[in-house]
Amino acid sequence: MTASIRLQRIRHALSLIALTAALGGCASFSPDGGVGTAQFLALSELDKDAVKISNEADAISAQARVEKLLKGAVSADAAVQIALLNNRGLQASYNDLGLAEAQMVAASLPPNPRFAVSRLTGRLETEIERTVVASLFALATLPARREIAADTFRNAQLKAADATFKLAADTRRQFYRAVAANQQVGYLQQAVATSEATSELIKRLGESGGMNKLEQAREHALYAETTAQLAKAKLQQKVERERLIRLLGLWGRDTALRLPASLPPLPARLQSAKEVEAQALKKRLDLQIARGDLDILAKRLGLTQATRFVNDVDLLGRRTADRKNTFTVDGDGAVQVDREKRNLKTLELEFEIPLFDFGQSKVAAAEQTYLASANRLAEKAVNIRSEAREAYTGYRGTWDIARHYQNQVLPLRKVIQDESLLQYSGMLIDVTTLIVDARARILSNAQAVEARRDFWIASVDLKHVVIGGGGSGGGSPGSAVAAASDGGAPAH
């Protein structure tokens, strides 16, 4: 082997190594399955751990943490942490993220060449053909497709983080609903006990002739209505509890979780309204996802425009081996066999001729898809600004209503009840008026609980309208007002 031949072989080997290295810039699987973005955002924005359960050890560790959090009365923060550890729907979102990563890795790989072999046998000859086909089009567009796949995966990571935020927001809202339902039942039980005592007293007065039949009917009807309200409140209490249990992913003995006896007190100060809209436009994950989708469509549009005339280019290498036997008879009658061997190498290039379709339909479809996405992004930006203003309005309004109940309504009810007790002691009013005032105070307490519940739900809405994770939880500012107007205040 001469030195020049060795040098050529070395150069050829180096070329193959360089090509392999270029193709080897393919994406690989991340150690955390891509969930690192969701974990980082959950820790920075929620101060909670988002855990992907990938094996039995992870499951045992998560279950131990859940059991520890369930030992005492569960707070709102503990409920969110339990949901992030135990909710299977969130784990399914993380599994979908792993699927998106697998698709990204597959899209970043060069196409596999196709190999075919055929054998044609005749009477005196045999032909063996080996074919290798590679798509030059796929190789040429590999960097662009790899970049698009990476962007798609980054968007999938943001979607997983958004699913984490949504679960946290839903859990916190449902926690406040469940605690408020418990408080409502407590207050209505007091109202029913008061009404029952009144009803029994009225019954005795009626039997002694001290009260007419109309007044007796009014008191008995009020007792019956209060009892019905308590039954509805108990039903709602069970419903709210089960909804919370579903979000926490609890089952078996863990469903016997204990909740606080009352909602947290109102904060002394409200958050500032400054830059709520700007922060929402900067942080909202769904807006970032929409921007990412637009960037992906822009790159796909560019790729479509660049390859509009050609759909595919295949390079085909073929090696054909012919084996042919020729029999001749010499003068002595002996049979001579001549074996002929011939090898042929063929290189073919195959591509589509844009004779009828110049790719204009593909480009038009890609352009319209891109423009539609751009319009949706603009619409989302407008909506997010409006949602931020609405969330702050709800946050501020529910705080004002709850403070009104706390500072105005409840103190007045207490004064009324105290004065009624004094007048009853002086025999200036009868016992029914005293009991009615006591019952009205209990019902005002129940309405104050609703107002405080609406405020805490509105605070969750305000936080998540900035960072993402779902829309309003339904804690409308008017619900407390409606409750106040519908509240079972005594008719007399």
Image (spheres, rainbow, N blue to C red):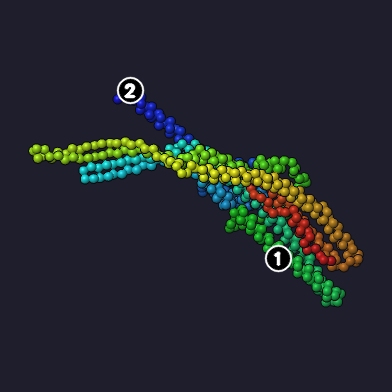
Q: Is residue 224 left or right of residue 344?
A: right
Q: Quadrant of the C terminus?
A: bottom right
Q: Is residue 176 left or right of residue 322?
A: right
Viewer-side residue, 355 vs 285: 355
First along the sequence among labels 1 and 2: 2
Note whether residue 19 is visible.
yes
Per the model, the C-alpha gap separating discs 1 and 2 is: 98 Å
Residue type at mark 2 is Ala
Q: Residue at x 61, y 42 (%)?
A: 291
Q: Residue 333: which quarter of the image? A: top left
Q: Residue at x 25, y 45 (%)?
A: 121
- Relative to 210, does residue 388 appear above or below in the rendering? above
Q: Residue 348: which quarter of the image? A: top left
Label 1: element kind: helix
Percent across and percent down for residue 33 are 53, 43
What mark, if any, has residue 231 been given in the picture?
A: 1
Percent across and percent down for residue 485 are 79, 60
Label 2: element kind: helix
Residue found farthest to the front: 356
Residue type at mark 1 is Ala
Viewer-side residue, 250 vs 312: 312
Q: What residue would you read off at disc 2? A: 3
Q: Residue at x 57, y 45 (%)?
A: 368
Note whether residue 196 is visible.
no
Residue found farthest to the left: 332
